[in-house]
Image (tube, rainbow, N blue to C red):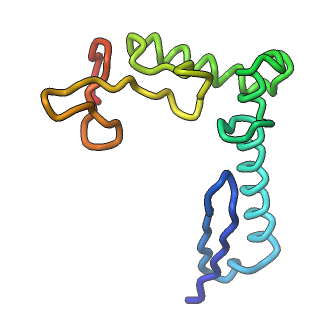
């Protein structure tokens, strides 16, 4: 079966798609791929912590108010506050500036081995443990 591959650089990284089957190269597949890319570009424009012109960066610098941002920004900030509360502030989107790209955990010294690194096994986080990690 023929595979049609597409790669586009979005959000500072390559995003790839492999389509198989009889509709892999038709207009509907092209339209769906473009819709996904449009969504990713919108997310980047709004939430990127790397783009100086993103709403998140501009909000962090005080150049726009929350009311001037797309409503999704307020929703993400609320989710970040909820994650901070639920984790006894082990997760915080305001450290050191606004970064909602993933409520980042505080690293804790773990024995003599140095800090725990989230994403590597089972990280140990600050705050009280309230369930599976």
Q: Quadrant of residue 21?
A: bottom right
Please say if 64 is above or below 5: above
Quadrant for the N terminus, please: bottom right
Counting from the top left corner in percent of width and height, residue 121 is at 25, 42
Q: Nearer the viewer, residue 98 or 24?
A: 98
Residue 72 in percent (x, y) is at 73, 27
Q: Residue at x 39, y 16 (%)?
A: 87
**Residue at the extreme left of the image, as rendered:** 112
Q: Relative to the observer, which residue lies in front, 43 or 25?
A: 43
Q: Residue 16, position in %: x, y?
A: 61, 67
Q: Quadrant of the C terminus?
A: top left
Residue at position x 74%, y 57% in the image:
37
Q: Position of residue 12 (x, y in %)?
A: 65, 54
Q: Is residue 122 above or below residue 58?
A: below
Name the residue rendered at 72%, 29% in the picture: 57
Task: Report the residue that reaches farthest toward the right.
Answer: 68
Q: Could you say which quadrant of the image residue 27 lies in?
A: bottom right
Residue lying at 19% horizontally and 27% vertically, measured from the top left: 110
Is residue 107 shown left or right of residue 15?
left
Q: Is residue 129 left or right of residue 15?
A: left
């Amino acid at each position: 079966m023929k595979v049609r591959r597409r790669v586009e650089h979005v959000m500072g990284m390559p995003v790839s798609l492999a389509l198989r089957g009889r509709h892999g190269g038709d207009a509907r597949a092209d339209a769906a791929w473009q819709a996904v890319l449009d969504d990713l570009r919108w997310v980047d424009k709004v939430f990127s912590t790397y783009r100086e012109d993103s709403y998140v960066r501009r909000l962090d610098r005080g150049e726009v108010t929350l009311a001037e941002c797309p409503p999704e920004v307020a929703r993400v900030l609320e989710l970040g506050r909820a994650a901070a509360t639920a984790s006894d502030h082990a997760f915080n989107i305001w450290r050191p500036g606004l970064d909602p790209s993933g409520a980042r955990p505080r690293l804790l010294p773990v024995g003599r081995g140095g800090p725990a690194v989230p994403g590597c096994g089972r990280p140990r986080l600050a705050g009280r443990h309230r369930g599976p990690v």
